[in-house]
Amino acid sequence: MQRKSKNSVFDLSGISIIACDCLQAVMCIFIDLFFVSKILKSGSGDGISSQIISIGLFYVIYYIVLSGSYSVTGFALKKINKSLFVSLGSILLAGVVLLVYFLQNNLATFVPLIAAVYGLGFGLYSAGYNGLTAETISSKHQVKFFAVKKIMFQMVYIAFPISLGFLADIDFSIVTYIMFGVAALLVVFSFLIRPKKSYQQSFNVPKFTKYMWQNRKQNKALWLVYLQNFFRGASYDCFTTLITILVISNFGSNESLGMFQSIFTACSLLTMFFYLKFYRKKRCVAFIAPTVALVACTIVAILTATNQITIVLFYGVYVTLNVILMSISDSRRSGVVRVLSLHSHILESNALSEFSLGLGRILGSLFLIFAGLFDGMTGGGTIFLKIALGVVVLMYACYGLSLIWLEKTLIKQDEEFRKAHLEENIVKTED
């Protein structure tokens, strides 16, 4: 019994990884929902195009700093305890909350400053967290662990959006105090993570990229991880912002925004339990393709008639089903580099994943900026915002296709490995 507990994927380190993920989700809820909401509400009655430009600018700066921070931290991660990066990032995220609190009446002016601090804080946090996760969770347990982690993550999105939205409408300072407590807990849990294996790690991204290119056939699965990260960044994060804009524009309150997020996240738990029960590699298309198709259909409904019914329909389908794609994507980002026995290059692979994700996110944010600019030039309508939504759904379709391609590549590699292993056993038997 003692040996089983020691080898369990859900030991203190595994639980601490999940706790950190859930706590940083609370910070992201605060920024991605209520910070964006405050910007939208800060404008005049002349349309929302200027606020959309501010939101797009915020995310462009945030994603540039976030991606760039991997270049700076990668060299230090080889030598310094990765938990320190998680803790320092958590403190900076608490600083973002403080900035939003003191500047809440003049947020649009300080968008670049808030975005830069947020990008640096989340960059430091993510660099340490992803490194700890890759060293702690074995590839054997990737699918189960990340599915359970996603379920806990979704539970946070049930409890906190509606409660924080209610509190934000009553007294924004209460939300600030809660965020400081969350940041303190993040620091505590980060130091409870103990990697099971310590690898001699390098950080030379150009050299690693050259190696990957020269051996692209053998490392095809990892290239596909970076490709699906790009399309994920260009769609998922932009969708989240577009949802916030649409809900606040049509419903008008933080409480409504939080209520919808909580209700639909509760529905997504059923999706995750279904996924956990029936997932097999060879059945991945049966999960991915319907998700992409249904989300695309609800986008068409919004483009045809933008009203409260179509917005709620899209919100519900997207939040309820998209967790499957995210769970598969997260597990592959951490697992494929180890499946290919590239353990010493975890830091470089995380950096390339973040760069590709960041490029997609920047592209998605530019869609928002251009939509705001063109809508402002044409009288403050939302026609270009709808066009941006249409482009983003194409990126989302590519995200789904790249995930299917990745899963099929991994299946093929498994079959080739088993075949080679079987032939090896036959040779040994004949000898």
Image (tube, grey):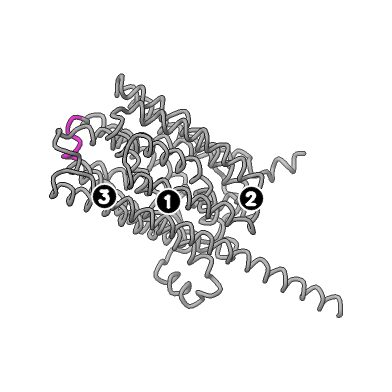
Q: Position of residue 325 (x, y in %)?
A: 51, 50
Q: Which residues are magenta?
A: 105-110
Name the residue rendered at 43%, 49% in the picture: 297
Which mark is in front, 1 or 3?
1
Where residue 46 appears, x then y in whole percent? 13, 37
Q: Which residue lies under the disc numbered 3?
A: 368
Q: Are marks 1 and 2 in contact (CB under 8 Å)?
A: no
Q: Is residue 135 left or right of residue 9?
A: left
Among numbered discs 2 and 3, the one appearing first in the sequence: 2
The reply, left or right, for residue 305 in relation to residue 48 is right
The residue at which mark 2 appears reads as 279
Rendering coords of residue 33 (x, y %): 34, 36
Q: Which mark is residue 379?
A: none
Extreme residue in the top direction: 170
The amino acid marked with disc number 2 is Tyr
Q: What amino acid is at disc 3?
A: Leu
The dot on residue 296 is: 1
Instruction: Decide which of 184, 426 is in the foreground and name it.
Output: 426
Report which quarter residue 9 is drawn in. top right
Give the mark nearer the N terminus: 1 vs 3.
1
SS under mark 2: loop
Q: Secondary structure at mark 3?
A: helix
Label 1 sits on a secondary structure element that is helix
